[in-house]
Image (cartoon, helix red, strand yellow):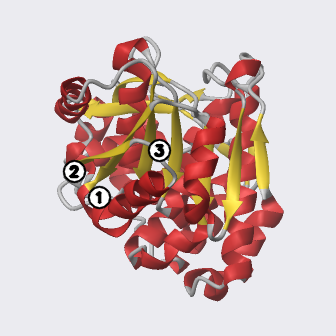
Amino acid sequence: MTIRVATAEQRSASYDILIGRGLFAELPSLVQAACPAARYAVITDSDVATLYGDKLVARCHDATLHAELFAFPAGEASKTRETWASLSDRLLQRQFGRDCGVIALGGGVVGDVAGFVAATYLRGVPYIQVPSTLLAMIDSSIGGKTGVDVPAGKNLLGAFHQPRLVVADLDLLRTLPAPQLAAGIAEAVKHAAIADADYFAFLEREHDAVTTRQPEALERLVRRSVEIKADVVAADERETGRRAILNFGHTVAHAVETTAKFAVLHGEAVAIGMAYEARLAELLGIAAAGTAQRIGRLLERYGLPLALPEGATAEQLLATMRLDKKARAGTVRFALPEAVGCMHADGSSWTVAAPEGVVREVLAAG
């Protein structure tokens, strides 16, 4: 299955997302066709390197492609300027030139870091995304956002750099731990909540099939989420308009991750963020009554958290939110739903400036 991301602003930056099974074995030919290069840097983390990294490099060598593995310690704690600098220095030491390509093999952290390396190395080299987690397949590998975290907050340094190709091999999900699967489902719930009430109903109805990784259910989930994400980012590559709806749950989520020092999985933080932001939407009179309850109930069914981490305070979270990329003039802004499947728009703006007193009330209510 192929889904095209036809970017409106730069047609030359359009690319395909391939979804299927057994695609890993075809990677050398897919890479060579979409991202021809003299040498390839396979960037991954220590966990994925053991599972798939060495195999990919070996397959590339069998296909007479020059590929080298560059791994860094797994986990959000490695999504830093230091990791970006170390990887860039290692590529320079190995004398990778402007005729090289980058293969980002792994989850969201790998995709963001490797993409940022590709965006900045020698002023930019091409890359492809090979996501190995559900969250990366349906969300973070699509749209060209790359970057790293800093002490002030999540993803505050980065660049837009579109991949040449995204290859989502569903077979890679077989080795995905259950908490990581649930974290990816949180993003699927977000996609359904912002754009497709029928898809939301599917996630409600097919809970057992999704959590037990039944092929048909998992394929439908990945396909529909990718379609939604691709449609939104294709029309708004640089997040100047409707793409902001993809941030539902993320204003609170990023604050949760930062204050918890990234001890919470991103998908778990997004689930918490959606629970609180949906309640905020109802309190502001934007969302229909019952919207927050329905979203929260679905998240809870998939084993996702709804409460703030222990020790997190409203004041800490608000201080972090003021540094959020969506904040304007120190005012915290949120992408909020009107109902399941429909996001609120105020003229040309897809975000809402919420009074801090109201935000504080929602956060403190728990």
Distance between mark 2 and mark 3 Cα atoms: 42 Å
Horizontal side of residue 93 vs 145, given as left or right: left
Report which residue position mark 2 lands on: 260
**For the N terminus, which image quadrant?**
bottom right
Q: Earlier in the sequence, mark 2 or mark 3?
A: 3
Distance between mark 2 and mark 1 Cα atoms: 7 Å
Q: Position of residue 289 (x, y in %)?
A: 70, 58
Q: Position of residue 159 (x, y in %)?
A: 45, 21
Q: Residue 26 occupies which quadrant of the picture?
A: bottom right
Q: Secondary structure at mark 2?
A: loop
Q: Position of residue 203 (x, y in %)?
A: 69, 73
Residue type beneath disc 2:
Ala
- Which residue sits at x=60%, y=37%? 335
Q: Nearer the viewer, residue 91 or 192?
A: 91
Task: Relative to 6, say whether 167 is above or below.
Answer: below
Q: Nearer the viewer, residue 286 or 60?
A: 60
